[in-house]
Amino acid sequence: MNTTTTTAAPPGTEITWDEAFCSEGANCFRFGRDTEGKAYIGTTESATYVTDSIDALRALISAVKAGAADHLLA
């Protein structure tokens, strides 16, 4: 996985963000994508985001669904 964390999209890149997912404490995460096929995960509190390929995001979501992050919830 070649994940990159950044605070600004490359020049000429437009990110289309989905509606944010918010918890009770108003910790909001959002997913986005650009026309080049990259996926983005960010928060509504910061301009910083993580970006990688759509396939990498798909693998992350599958791993989370399979329980790979369950230990973080304990």
Image (cartoon, rainbow, N blue to C red):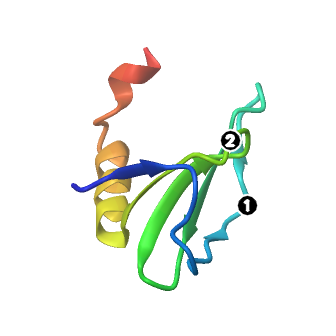
Q: Tag 2: residue type?
A: Ser
Q: Is residue 55 left or right of residue 26?
A: left
Tell me: residue 62, above or below residue 24: below
User: Residue visible at 28% across and 58% down?
Assistant: 59
User: Residue visible at 58% across and 46% down?
Assistant: 48
The image quarter containing residue 44 is top right
Does label 1 or label 2 sit earlier along the sequence? 1
**Could you tell me residue 9's position as x and y percent?**
55, 65
Say which of 33 and 69 sits in front.
33
Image disc number at residue 19: 1
Mark 2 secondary-structure assignment: loop
Using a 10 Å C-alpha cutoff, classify the residue at mark 2 as few (fewer than 14 neighbours), some (14 to 19) or many (20 or more): few
- The residue furthest bottom is 35
User: Residue visible at 58% across and 81% down?
Assistant: 12
- The residue furthest front is 11
Q: Which residue is mark 2?
A: 46
Using a 10 Å C-alpha cutoff, classify the residue at mark 1 as few (fewer than 14 neighbours), some (14 to 19) or many (20 or more): few
Mark 1 secondary-structure assignment: loop
Total number of numbered discs in the rendering = 2
For the C terminus, the quadrant is: top left
Q: Tag 1: residue type?
A: Glu
